[in-house]
Image (cartoon, helix red, strand yellow):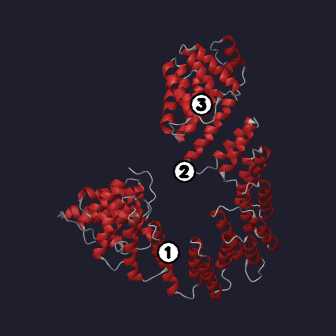
C-alpha cells in the first residue's frame, strides 16, 4: 500500500508534447476492454476507474492507486488502467512493472499512439536503449510525419554508441523540419566522435552558407580553422564576422584566442581590455566576454593570471556590481589566492548582507584554512540571516567541537534539528551522529549510544555512525555482537576503507577471535593510504595475541616512529607485552 506518492505523469510529459489521451477529459472517457464484462462488472469497473481519475486529479495518489488496482482485478486487459498504473510504478522505482504495464497496454490497444510513445520514452529513460530503438522505429513507420520521433531515435542510437545510425536519423529529421543550428551542431559533434573532421566541418559550412549574414557561424568556422592551425583562414572568417556585426562579443574573444595561438599574448590581452573599456558595451556583455576568455585560457591549460588585471579594470568601471565581484572571487579561489578572494566575498556581504552565495564562499575558505574562530563568526551571522538553513548549525557544531566547547556544540546541533526539513532523513541522521560523538567526548556513554540509535533510525546505513558506534562499544566491551553486526555492515558498504576494517579487526580482537582480527587488520594496513600509526599499534597488539611477540614489538616500535605518543605504547615496548589502554575507553 502506498503511504505517500508524488504523482508525476510519465516521463514523456517532460519532453514537450501532450499525448492524445491526455488531451481529452479522462473523467468522461470510456475504458475499452478486450473482455466481455457483465453489466454489474462494467458498472463496478467504470466506478473504480473514474473514481481513480478523480482521486489522482485531487492529489490522493495512494487511494487512486488502489482504485486502479481494483479495475485491474476486474479486467486485466484494460489499456487505460494499465497506462495509469505504469506511471505509478515509474515513481515507485519499479521499472520492470512500469514497462510490463505499458507493454500490456500496447498489446491490448495496438493503435494507440499515447501508449506506444509512453513505452518507448520510459524504455529510453530507463536506459533500455535497444528496446527503445525498436519501439521508435515502429512508431516512425506508422507516424512518419512526427518529427520528434526522429530526434528521440537519434538520441537512443547515440546512447547505444550507434553514431552512424544517429546521424542518419538526424538527416531524416532535417528533411522534415529543414536545416537549423541545433541539428547541424549535433551532427557536427557526432561526426567528430567518428573522427570524420571533413564531414563535421561541412555541417558548419552549410550553416554559414545558408545564413551568410549570421556572424556567429563565421566565428564558429574561424574557431574550427584555429583548432586546425589554419591561421589565415581563421583570421579571414573572424574579419568577415566583424564586417557583418562589429559589436559581436564572440569576435572579441575569438580574436584574443587567435592572438594567443599566434604567440602575441600582449595583443590578446589588449583585445579584451579594449572591449572592457568600450562604453558602447554593457556590463553583462563585458562579463560575458571576460568569462569566455577565462574559459578558453582554462581549456588550453594556460595560466589565468592575465585575467586578473582585466577584472580589476572592469571593477573600476562597475564597483557596485555584485556578480562581477563574485566571479572575480571565484577566479581567485581557483588560482589559490584565498586572501584576495576572501576580500571580494567580504565586500559582497557588506554590500548585500543576505547574499547566501558570498557567505558560503567565505565559510568554505574558513573551513579550508581551519580558521575556527572565523567559522564560528560566519555561522553565527548566517544563522541570524538564514535561520532555516541547517548547514550553518552543522558547521557551527563542528567548530565548537574543535574547540572542545562541547555544550555549545550540542546546543548548535539540537537547534539545527528543529530546522531540518522533515523529509531530509539523512541529514537528521548526520546531526544525531555528531551529537553522539560529542556525548562520547563528554564521557556520557548512555547519551552517546542513545544518539547513535536515533541516527540509525533515520539512516540505517550511516556508515560513519555505524563505525563509531561499533568501535566505542568494543572499547566498552559492551554489546559486542551488535558491534560486530554494525561493523560488518560498514565493510559491506565500504569494503576498501582501512578505518572500518581496523574497527572490524578490533572487535574480533576484543572478542578473543585473534585469527580473524589478524586477517582484517592486515587487510586494513594494505588498504591504508594515511600511514596511520594507530593501525600499526593495533597490528602489534593482535600479533602479540597470536603468539608472535617479536613481530608485535617491531610493530609497536614502528608505531612510535610514525608519531604515536602514549605512555601505554612506551610500556608495551619496554616490557615487551600487551597492555590494555584504559585511556582509550
Q: Residue drawn at (81%, 74%), measured in percent from left and top?
A: 317
Q: Residue drawn at (54%, 24%), measured in percent from left and top?
A: 507
Q: To which residue does mark 3 refer?
A: 449
Percent coordinates x, y for residue 438 in the rendering: 68, 34
- Front residue of 234/473: it is 234
| Mark 3 / mark 1, whichever is N-terminal | 1
Q: Secondary structure at mark 1?
A: helix
State the separation of the CA atoms marked 2 and 1: 42 Å
Q: Secondary structure at mark 2?
A: loop
Determine whether, in the image, residue 87 is placed left or right of residue 530: left
| Mark 2 / mark 3, whichever is N-terminal | 2
State the separation of the CA atoms marked 2 and 3: 24 Å
Please tell me whether residue 19 is drawn above or below residue 48 in the rendered image.
below
- Front residue of 544/422: it is 544
Marks 2 and 1 close (CB-CB < 8 Å): no
State the separation of the CA atoms marked 3 and 1: 59 Å
The C terminus: image quadrant: top right
Q: To which residue does mark 2 refer?
A: 423
Please tell me whether residue 118 is drawn above or below residue 241 in the rendered image.
above
Percent coordinates x, y for residue 391 in the rendering: 66, 50
Q: Secondary structure at mark 3?
A: helix
Q: Nearer the viewer, mark 2 or mark 1?
A: 1
Where on the picture, by quarter, is residue 168?
A: bottom left
Instruction: Give the crowd class for mark 3: few <14, some 14-19, many >=20 residues within 10 Å.
Output: many
Where on the picture, by quarter, is residue 436?
A: top right
Q: To which residue does mark 1 refer?
A: 185
Percent coordinates x, y for residue 9 in the rendering: 41, 64
Please tell me whether residue 78 is drawn above or below residue 221 in the rendered image.
above
- Front residue of 257/81: it is 257
Marks 2 and 3 close (CB-CB < 8 Å): no
| Mark 2 / mark 1, whichever is N-terminal | 1
Count of numbered badges drawn on the protein: 3
Amino acid at each position: 500500500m502506498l503511504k505517500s506518492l508524488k504523482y508525476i505523469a510519465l516521463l514523456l510529459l517532460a519532453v514537450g508534447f501532450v499525448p492524445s489521451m491526455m488531451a481529452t477529459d479522462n473523467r468522461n472517457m470510456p475504458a475499452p476492454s478486450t473482455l466481455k464484462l457483465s453489466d454489474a462488472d462494467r458498472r463496478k469497473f467504470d466506478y473504480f476507474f473514474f473514481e481513480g481519475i478523480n482521486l489522482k486529479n485531487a492529489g490522493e495518489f495512494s487511494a487512486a492507486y488502489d482504485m486502479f488496482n481494483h479495475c485491474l482485478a476486474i479486467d486485466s486487459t484494460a489499456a487505460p488502467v494499465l497506462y495509469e498504473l505504469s506511471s505509478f510504478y515509474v515513481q515507485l522505482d519499479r521499472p520492470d512493472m512500469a514497462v510490463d504495464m505499458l507493454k500490456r497496454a500496447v498489446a491490448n490497444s495496438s493503435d494507440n499512439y499515447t501508449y506506444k510513445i509512453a513505452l518507448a520514452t520510459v524504455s529510453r529513460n530507463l536506459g533500455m536503449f535497444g528496446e527503445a530503438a525498436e519501439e521508435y522505429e515502429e512508431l516512425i513507420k506508422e507516424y512518419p510525419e512526427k518529427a520528434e520521433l526522429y530526434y528521440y531515435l537519434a538520441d537512443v542510437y547515440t546512447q547505444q554508441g550507434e553514431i552512424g545510425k544517429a546521424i542518419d536519423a538526424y538527416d531524416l529529421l532535417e528533411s522534415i523540419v529543414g536545416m537549423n543550428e541545433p541539428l547541424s551542431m549535433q551532427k557536427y559533434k557526432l561526426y567528430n566522435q567518428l573522427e570524420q573532421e571533413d564531414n563535421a566541418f561541412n555541417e558548419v559550412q552549410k550553416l554559414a552558407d545558408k545564413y551568410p549574414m549570421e556572424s556567429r557561424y563565421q566565428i564558429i568556422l574561424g574557431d574550427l580553422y584555429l583548432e586546425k592551425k589554419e591561421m589565415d583562414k581563421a583570421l579571414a572568417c573572424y574579419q568577415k564576422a566583424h564586417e557583418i556585426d562589429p559589436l559581436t562579443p564572440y569576435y572579441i574573444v575569438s580574436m584574443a584566442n587567435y592572438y594567443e595561438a599566434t604567440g602575441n599574448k600582449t595583443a590578446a590581452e589588449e583585445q579584451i581590455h579594449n572591449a572592457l573599456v568600450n562604453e558602447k558595451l554593457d556590463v553583462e556583455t563585458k562579463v560575458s566576454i571576460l568569462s569566455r576568455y577565462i574559459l578558453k585560457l582554462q581549456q588550453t591549460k594556460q595560466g589565468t593570471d592575465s585575467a586578473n588585471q582585466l577584472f580589476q579594470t572592469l571593477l573600476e568601471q562597475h564597483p557596485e556590481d555584485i556578480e562581477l565581484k563574485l566571479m572575480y572571487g571565484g577566479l581567485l579561489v581557483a588560482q589559490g589566492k584565498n586572501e584576495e578572494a576572501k576580500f571580494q566575498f567580504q565586500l559582497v556581504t557588506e554590500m548585500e548582507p543576505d547574499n547566501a552565495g558570498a557567505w558560503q564562499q567565505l565559510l568554505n575558505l574558513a573551513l579550508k584554512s581551519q580558521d575556527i574562530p572565523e567559522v564560528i563568526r560566519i555561522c553565527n551571522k548566517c544563522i541570524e540571516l538564514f535561520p532555516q538553513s541547517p548547514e550553518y548549525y552543522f558547521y557551527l557544531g563542528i567548530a565548537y567541537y574543535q574547540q572542545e566547547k562541547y555544550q555549545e556544540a550540542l546546543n548548535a546541533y539540537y537547534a539545527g534539528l528543529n530546522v531540518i526539513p522533515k523529509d531530509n532523513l539523512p541529514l537528521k541522521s548526520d546531526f544525531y551522529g555528531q551529537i553522539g560523538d560529542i556525548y562520547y567526548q563528554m564521557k556520557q556513554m548512555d547519551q552517546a549510544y542513545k544518539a547513535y540509535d536515533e541516527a540509525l533510525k533515520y539512516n540505517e546505513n550511516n556508515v560513519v555512525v555505524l563505525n563509531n558506534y561499533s568501535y566505542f562499544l568494543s572499547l566498552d566491551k559492551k554489546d559486542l555482537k551488535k558491534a560486530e553486526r554494525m561493523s560488518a555492515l560498514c565493510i559491506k558498504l565500504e569494503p576498501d576503507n582501512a578505518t572500518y576494517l581496523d574497527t572490524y579487526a578490533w572487535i574480533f580482537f576484543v572478542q578473543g577471535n585473534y585469527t580473524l582480527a589478524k586477517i582484517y587488520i592486515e587487510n586494513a594496513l594494505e588498504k591504508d593510504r594515511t600511514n596511520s600509526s594507530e593501525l600499526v599499534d593495533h597490528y602489534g597488539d593482535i600479533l602479540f595475541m597470536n603468539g608472535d611477540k617479536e613481530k608485535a614489538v617491531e610493530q609497536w616500535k614502528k608505531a612510535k616512529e610514525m608519531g604515536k605518543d602514549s605512555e601505554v605504547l612506551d610500556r608495551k615496548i619496554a616490557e615487551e607485552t600487551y597492555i590494555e589502554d584504559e585511556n582509550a575507553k
